[in-house]
Amino acid sequence: MRKYTQHYQGFEATGALEYIQRKSPDGKTVHAEFVAGTREHAEQAIACAVEAFTAWSELPGTQRGLILNRWADRVEAHAEQLAIIDAEEVRKPIRLARGDMNAAVSLIRYAASLASQLEGEAFTDAGPDKMGITIREAIGVVGAILPWNFPGLIFCQKVPFALAAGCTVVVKPSEFTSSSALELAKLAEESGVPAGVITVVTGYGAPVAETITRHPDVKLVTFTGSTQTGQKIIESSASTIKPLSLELGGKAASIVFENADLQKAAEKVAFAAFFNQGECCVAQSRLLVQRGVADRFTEMVVAETRKITSGDLLNPETEIGSLIHNGHFEKVKEMVAKGESHGAQVITGGNADANAEQDYYPPTILNNVAANNPAFLEEIFGPVLTVTPFDTLEEAAYLANLPGYGLSNSIWSQDITTCLRLGKKLLSGTVYVNTAIDGQPQFAFGGYNKSGYGREMGKHGFEEFTQVKTLSIDITR
C-alpha cells in the first residue's frame, strides 16, 4: 500500500491527520492512502508557490525547457510504475494506462519546446517619437484541479505548460486518484524543478479546491471535470475575478454517412464509445448514422462491441475495466433504465447485476434513441452508446449540437466536401474526421458552450498561462 503526505516544502502535521483510502472494487485491497487536506494545507501550499514564483519566472525560458526535458526523461523511466498506479486507482486496463503515460511524456517534451517562445510584438508606426511593445508574462500562481479519469495524463496537459510559461502550480488531484500527481511532482523535483514550483494538496473539494479557487494569490484556475462542478468554481472564484480555464462535460457524436468506410468506422465508433469505460469527456457516446445504412451499420458496431474484453486490469489483453466507484455504477445503470423508459431498446450489454460487486458495467448499446430521450441529451459518462438515425447533413448537425455540449464530434465520410461542410456547422472545439479520440500535444483542446472555455495543449494552451502587457514608449530625448 502507498501512503502519502502533502507535497510542499515545510508541510507539518498539526494534530492527527485524517486519511482517504483508495480501495479495489471489492473493498479487499487498499491501494493507497492520501491525507484529507485542510484549508490550512492549501494555504500553506499556495504560500510556497508564491515564494517560488519570482525566481522560476525570471529563469530564462531555455533553462526552464532543459529542466522540463529532464523531467520528461524521469517520467519515461518510471512510466510503467505510474501506469500501474493509474490502472489500480482509476480501475482502467494497463494497456490504456500505459498509453496515458506515453502521452504524458510527449506533453512534457512539447511544453519544454515552448518554454523559450514567450513572444511579444513591436509597433513602430505610432509616429516618429513613439513606439509600442507588447510582452507576454507568466500570470502567476496557478491552481490546477484534476479529474479522476486520466489523473497522470491531465496533470501533464496542464502543469508542464504552466511551468514552461514561468508559472508555479498548486495541484489538487481527485480524492480517488491522487497517487500519480504526487509521484509526478516528486519526479519533477528530482529533475531540478525547485521546491515550491509544483505543490500538491490532496483531499476533498471542500475545503481544498474551494480554498484554491477563492484565494487572491492564485491568479488562474485550470479545471477539468463536470459541468456542474465547473459552475461552482465560477461562483467561488468570482470574488477574486480571476481567469478560468474550464474543460467540462461532453456528449460527443460519431456521425456516419452512407459513403463512409463502414468497417473502419464501426471499429472506431466502438472504440470511441467505450474507451476508458466511457469515463472520458470526449467519448463518442452517441452514434448518428444515415438512415440508408443504419440497420446494417448498427449490427457492425454491435459485433465490434462484443469483441471488447474485460478481466484482470494488469493483463495487457484487457480492454475495459470497472467504473470509478459504486455510486457512479448506479448512476450509469439508472441512466440506461431511464433511456429504456423513454422508448430505447438495449441491443447488447445492459445486464449489469452479475458484476455489481466489481462496479463493472458491460459495454451497452441503446437503439432507436429519440432526440428528446434523456440518454441522448444527458452526459452518462459510462460505457453506453446511443443510436439515432438521420437523413440529411443539416439534420445531423442539428442532432449533434442539440445537447448543448461542445468538446468533440467525429465525422465519417469519404467525401471531403461533406466533412468540411458539416465540420463548420458543428459547435465543438474538436472535430475528428475519419478518426476519433486522436489528439497530439500541439493540437489545442477545449470546448464550446456547456463544455467550458479556455484551451489546453498546443500554443494556445501555453498562452492560457500568460497575460499581455503593453509598453507605450516616448522615444524623444
Image: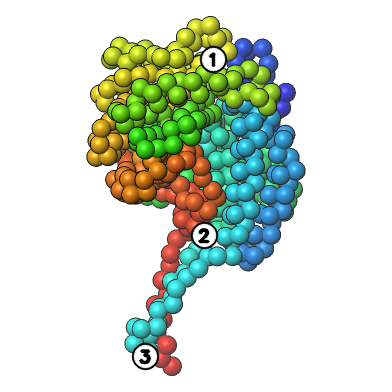
SS under mark 1: loop
Tag 1 near tag 2, CB within 8 Å:
no
Task: Indicate the position of residue 471 as horizontal and vertical percent values.
Answer: 42, 75
Give the amino acid type for the residue marked by disc 3 in the picture. Answer: Pro
The span from disc 1 to disc 2 (Cα, nearest Å) is 43 Å
Residue 26 seen in the figure:
yes
Question: Is residue 297 placed above or below 172 in the rendered structure?
Answer: above
- Mark 1 or 2: the one toward you: 1
Quarter placement of the C terminus: bottom left
Task: Indicate the position of residue 46 as horizontal and vertical percent values.
Answer: 56, 46
Residue 13 seen in the figure:
no
SS under mark 2: strand
Q: Which residue is mark 2?
A: 138
The span from disc 3 to disc 2 (Cα, nearest Å) is 31 Å
Name the quadrant containing residue 260: top left
SS under mark 3: loop
Q: Which residue is mark 3?
A: 128
Q: Which residue is mark 1?
A: 359
Q: Are there few (<14), some (14-19), or many (20+) residues within 10 Å of tag 1?
A: many
The span from disc 1 to disc 3 (Cα, nearest Å) is 72 Å
Q: Residue furthest bottom?
A: 477
Is residue 439 or residue 263 the one in the foreground? 263
Task: Indicate the position of residue 307 as horizontal and vertical percent values.
Answer: 55, 21
* Residue at 50% across, 63% down: 137
* Residue at 49% across, 39% down: 437
